[in-house]
């Protein structure tokens, strides 16, 4: 056995280190604290939320950011609707043109068949004799439904033939025939159906959102006299709000309290700890956070990358 066959890179399979060195497949990487959004940060601008406001599922935004986002989504929806209307009109006109072409093709084929000289059938007299045995002449009846069905069938066959001719004519023009976007059946101008409602961009999967359903959020603040920095705290236990704490939003009043205090005081008393506003269990929403070990409603601290 030659010496080079014993090298580490000459094996018949990939070692763990060789597989990690390749930029191929799915790779996982743990995200650090700098990659995490703070608990009081807006999901759109990633800064501390100014005039904080939450959706019904506890996603925090700046009031200005979320209103701009909703207006931008509405503009995009109206633009897509106009495109859909234009595309529908174009498809309707194209269908009418194809129907006219198919009708002309059927008429031309009928005229060609009428011009041909048909040979006289030898068994025509036999048919007359058989029919004359009964002593009654059979009346010629026209069935409108049958005629319409035959005409429709002929038009469909003509349309299919025209489509096949179009595909055959476009084949020599295909530079990369293996690409789905360049196949004859692909329509580059096709507009996909759009959602008719504005969606929350922070959730996965997305959920509907509107200006009426947004909840103004109130954080309790604590000013540090030494550093002159304002920290957000829980109004009950006075703990500083971080990603390590699970937070809850009281929907009727908008106060933010840590989950431990909510379970101890708010759920039992059926009222907010700060302003004594009545609230039920369905009025309490878990706020979404990142980088927490509680993975029920928190974003995972791992990122996946797929290399092809």
Image (cartoon, helix red, strand yellow):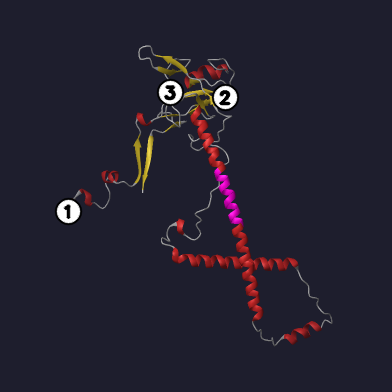
Q: Is label 3 in a helix, a strand or a loop?
A: loop
Q: Does the segment drawn in magenta span residue 145?
A: no
Note whether 146 is above or below 88 in the view shown: below
Magenta part of the protein: which range?
79-92
Counting from the top left corner in percent of width and height, residue 256 is at 50, 21
Residue 283 is marked as 2
The quadrant the N terminus occupies is bottom left
Disc 3: which residue? 245
Counting from the top left corner in percent of width and height, residue 212 is at 59, 29
Note whether 17 is above or below 4 in the view shown: above
Query: Which is more toward the observer, 268 or 39?
Result: 39
Query: Which is more toward the observer, 208 or 26?
Result: 208
Q: Does the segment drawn in magenta span residue 83?
A: yes
**254 displayed left or right of 11:** right
Does the image show residue 151?
yes
Q: What residue appears at the point 53 percent right and 38 percent down from the top-left corner?
A: 73
Contact (Cβ within 8 Å) of mark 1 with mark 3? no
Counting from the top left corner in percent of width and height, residue 120 is at 69, 86
How packed mark 1 is, by other alpha carbons closer than 10 Å (few <14, some 14-19, many 20 or more), is few
Q: CA distance from mark 1 to mark 3?
A: 57 Å
Mark closer to the chain start, 3 or 2 = 3
Q: What residue appears at the point 73 percent right and 85 percent down from the top-left corner?
A: 124
Disc 1: which residue? 4
Q: CA distance from mark 3 to mark 2?
A: 20 Å
Q: Is label 1 in a helix, a strand or a loop?
A: helix
């Amino acid at each position: 056995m030659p010496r080079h066959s014993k090298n580490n890179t000459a094996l018949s399979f990939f070692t763990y280190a060789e597989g990690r060195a390749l930029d191929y497949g799915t790779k996982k990487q743990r995200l650090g604290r700098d990659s995490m959004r703070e608990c009081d940060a807006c999901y759109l601008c990633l800064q501390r939320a100014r005039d904080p406001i939450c959706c019904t599922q506890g996603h925090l935004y700046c009031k200005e950011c979320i209103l701009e986002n909703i207006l931008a989504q509405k503009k995009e929806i109206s633009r897509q609707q106009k495109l859909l209307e234009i595309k529908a009109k174009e498809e309707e006109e194209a269908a009418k043109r194809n129907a006219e072409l198919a009708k002309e093709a059927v008429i031309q084929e009928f005229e060609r068949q009428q011009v041909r000289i048909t040979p006289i059938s030898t068994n025509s007299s036999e048919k007359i004799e058989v029919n004359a045995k009964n002593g009654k002449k059979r009346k010629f009846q026209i069935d409108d439904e049958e005629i319409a069905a035959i005409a429709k069938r002929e038009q469909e066959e003509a349309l299919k033939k025209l489509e096949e001719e179009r595909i055959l004519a476009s084949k020599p023009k295909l530079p990369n025939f293996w690409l789905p976007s360049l196949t004859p059946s692909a329509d580059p101008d096709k507009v996909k159906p759009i959602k008719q409602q504005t969606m929350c961009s922070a959730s996965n999967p997305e959920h509907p959102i509107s200006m009426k359903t947004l909840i103004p959020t109130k954080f309790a603040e604590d000013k540090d006299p030494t550093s002159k920095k304002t920290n957000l705290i829980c109004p009950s236990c006075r703990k500083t709000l971080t990603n390590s704490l699970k937070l809850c939003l009281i929907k009727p009043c908008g106060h933010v309290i840590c989950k431990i205090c909510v379970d101890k005081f708010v759920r039992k008393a059926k009222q907010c700890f700060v302003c004594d506003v009545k609230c039920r269990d369905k009025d309490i929403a878990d706020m979404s956070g990142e980088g927490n070990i509680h993975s029920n409603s928190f974003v995972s601290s791992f990122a996946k990358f797929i290399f092809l």
